[in-house]
Amino acid sequence: MAILNFSNLDETTKENRTFDKGPKVLLKDGAQFTGKIFFLEERETKSGTGRYLSVGISIDNHNCTVFEILNIENQNEKAVEIALKNIRNILKFNGITSESFDSNDLMGLNVCVTLGVRTKYNSPDKENFVKFYNSFAGKTVNTEGQHVQAKMPSSTHSKAWGETKSEDEIPF
């Protein structure tokens, strides 16, 4: 498995990061939403035997943020397989067709997600979670009973995808 390198993250920025979530909004279970990745950080698992990407998604037109974990290195191969599939769907939704990518380039990308609702751990409160990432860019997306056109990002991506491969890229 390829090693992802996030060494360019400023440690002081990581320590001082806070998120103002505003009033809690609970979105409909099973509905599809578009959003943008606004937070991305690589973390080590509690056991120290794996790594994951902590991903924050801001849902468009709603005061809602959803945090997601994508296992990029784990003893459970199925967890890694699911994470790589989700990453491929994010890239595909943004019109990026590449056999490799740098995980730092996920920051700021648009996503289309199907959300679920679950009870928070050790709390009676409910929260939204990502059931799965959708990859059908440009197709009609049903968002809470309304059909809207899933939009591609307006700007072109700065990296020439697939031109170089380095040790911090994951091949598909």
Image (tube, grey):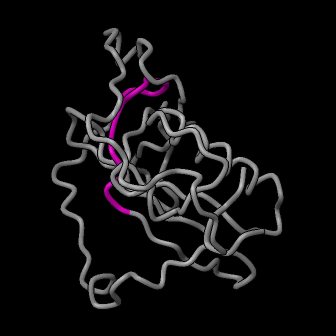
Name above or below for residue 46 compared with residue 12: above
Report if residue 131 is visible in the image: no
Report if residue 162 is visible in the image: yes
Residue furthest to the front: 163
Q: Choose between 50 and 125: the one closer to the eye.
A: 50
Q: Choose between 34 and 121: the one closer to the eye.
A: 34
Q: What is the x, y in percent for residue 46?
A: 64, 81
Q: What is the x, y in percent for residue 43?
A: 54, 76
Name above or below for residue 146 compared with residue 94: above
Q: Is residue 42 left or right of residue 1?
A: left
Name above or below for residue 4 compared with residue 35: below
Q: Quadrant of residue 39?
A: bottom left
**Residue located 41% across and 83% down the image:** 8
**Residue located 52% across and 22% down the image:** 136
Which residues are the magenta region? 28-39
Report the label total. Answer: 0
**Residue located 54% across and 63% down the image:** 102
Residue 32 is covered by the magenta coloring: yes
Q: Is residue 92 left or right of residue 57?
A: right
Q: Choose between 23 and 37: the one closer to the eye.
A: 37
Q: What is the x, y in percent for residue 111?
A: 42, 38
- Main SS of residues in magenta: strand
Q: Quadrant location of the N terminus?
A: bottom right
Q: What is the x, y in percent for residue 145?
A: 35, 10
